[in-house]
Image: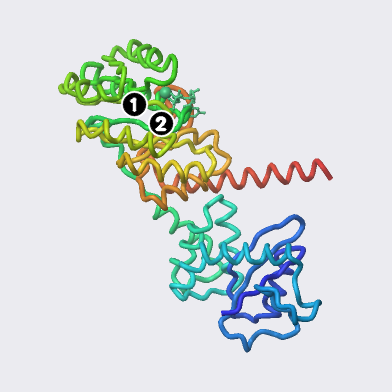
């Protein structure tokens, strides 16, 4: 396989260069904007179709090559970086399946899916999984429907059947608010007698008072632990309660070591299920780290909060697809008990697309205003 790198002022010119040089069978491996230029990396299997008037990109400097064909060290470093990125993310999926698509289809798909904020490996995976016969007109809708089908969800079974749920997540993501919403909904439906709140947040000053106030307002029993080690005896004391909601400190999700020590404390009662709380407005890399660390706690589901404050849902949707951890509910506002709904993949994807459209409109307005 020959890989070539093209730069042009816009995508149309870059694709024209690709077609001129590599012909119609070229595969677009990546495209991105770099300052005022668009960079496209394309590949072709058969080197005989490559026109020789396009200088090939060099992967290693060769002193004997003429100066006109060699790259500056910056360009070379950039070339190596982008090729490494391709090998790490794109090729394992795309090349393994041996799927060849017309450049226009790949370009349109990469463009649309990465604009949604989806991670590159998830974009590559979706393109890889599309049926080979997908044409340009159907490519984006087909990829969107594939994405929708891969967002894992689970019903909020505890709302009906109860359970022992421990909420874990970084500081400020909305764990306590979520717990209050769930407790309030339960009280509205079933009354306050069989629901209890437990605070295992021993780090943040005022955290336990916050939960006591919520408990008092709802009229439900509230226990505050001095140490997560007290979970076992608290569960024994609350054995007759149908729904027990356990609040934790943000520090429990901060590091792998903290998650491991919480996992040890949880081992006292196998009925406790962990729910990961993830804020949709967090940075994508942070969300990925959180999903990785929380594996120690073996969460059964996650809840996405702050949907209303997210500018893009790509990060959280990519992490959910990659981890396969089902989303149970989504929270889109701080009001208790409002703004909490079951997770619906189609609604999440539609929201991600709407956010993209709003961003594009805002950008256009800003550009027009500056002109
Ligand atoms: N906009 C918006 N705000 C939310 C949402 N959920 C919670 N909040 C707000 O986020 C802030 C933090 O919420 P908490 O519930 O205290 O967060 P926490 O995870 O318990 O934080 P720590 O106890 O410090 O770990 C509060 O001001 C909430 O009102 C939501 O879905 N949307
Ligand atoms: Mg809290």
Image side of residue 181 versus residue 186, left or right: right
Image side of residue 36 versus residue 272, left or right: right
SS for tag 1? helix
- The residue that mark 2 highlights is 340
Residue 32 versus residue 89: which sits nearer the camera?
89
Color encoding of the figure: rainbow
Residue 137 versus residue 62: which sits nearer the camera?
62
Please name the residue shown 54% across and 41% down the image: 283
Location of ligand 2 given as a quarter of the image = top left
Where, quadrant-wise, is the C terminus in this rendering?
top right
Could you tell me residue 205's position as x and y percent? Answer: 44, 15
Residue 66 versus residue 114: which sits nearer the camera?
66
Specify the label residue 182 is tagged with.
Answer: 1
Please name the residue shown 23% across and 30% down the image: 162
Mark 2 nearby-residue class (10 Å; few <14, some 14–19, many ≥20): many
Structural distance between the alpha carbons of marks 2 and 1: 9 Å
Please name the residue shown 41% across and 44% down the image: 291
Above or below, 27 against 285 in this view is below
Could you tell me residue 38's position as x and y percent? Answer: 71, 62
Mark 1 nearby-residue class (10 Å; few <14, some 14–19, many ≥20): many
Above or below, 20 against 323 in this view is below
N-terminal-most mark, 2 or 1 = 1
Residue at far right of view: 371
Residue at far front of view: 63
């Amino acid at each position: 396989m020959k890989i070539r790198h093209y730069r042009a002022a816009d995508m149309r010119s870059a694709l024209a260069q690709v077609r001129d040089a590599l012909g119609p069978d070229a595969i677009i491996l990546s495209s991105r904007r770099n300052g005022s230029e668009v960079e496209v990396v394309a590949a072709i299997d058969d080197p005989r179709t490559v026109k020789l008037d396009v200088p090939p990109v060099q992967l290693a400097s060769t002193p004997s090559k003429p100066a006109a064909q060699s790259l500056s060290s910056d360009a070379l470093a950039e070339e190596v970086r982008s090729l490494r990125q391709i090998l790490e993310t794109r090729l394992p999926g795309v090349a393994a399946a041996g799927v060849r698509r017309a450049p226009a289809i790949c370009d349109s798909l990469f463009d649309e899916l990465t604009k949604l904020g989806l991670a590159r490996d998830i974009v590559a995976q979706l393109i890889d999984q599309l049926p080979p016969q997908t044409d340009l007109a159907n490519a984006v809708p087909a990829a969107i429907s594939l994405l929708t089908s891969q967002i894992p969800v689970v019903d909020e079974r505890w709302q009906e059947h109860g359970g022992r749920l421990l909420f874990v997540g970084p500081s400020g993501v909305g764990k306590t608010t979520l717990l209050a919403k769930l407790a309030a909904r339960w009280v509205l439906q079933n009354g306050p007698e069989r629901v209890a709140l437990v605070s295992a947040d021993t780090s943040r000053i005022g955290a336990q008072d916050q939960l006591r106030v919520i408990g008092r307002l709802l009229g439900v029993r509230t226990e505050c632990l001095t140490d997560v080690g007290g979970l076992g005896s608290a569960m024994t004391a609350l054995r007759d309660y149908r729904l027990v909601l356990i609040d934790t400190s943000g520090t429990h999700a901060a590091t792998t070591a903290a998650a491991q020590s919480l996992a040890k404390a949880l081992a006292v009662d196998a009925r406790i299920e962990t729910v990961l709380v993830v804020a949709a407005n967090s940075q994508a890399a942070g969300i990925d780290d959180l999903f990785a660390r929380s594996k120690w706690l073996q969460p059964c589901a996650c809840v996405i909060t702050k949907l209303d404050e997210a500018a893009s849902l790509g990060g959280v949707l990519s992490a959910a697809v990659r981890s396969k951890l089902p989303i149970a509910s989504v929270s889109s506002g701080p009001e208790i008990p409002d703004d909490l709904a079951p997770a619906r993949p189609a609604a999440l994807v539609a929201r991600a697309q709407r956010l993209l459209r709003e961003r594009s409109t805002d950008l256009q307005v800003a550009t027009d205003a500056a002109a």
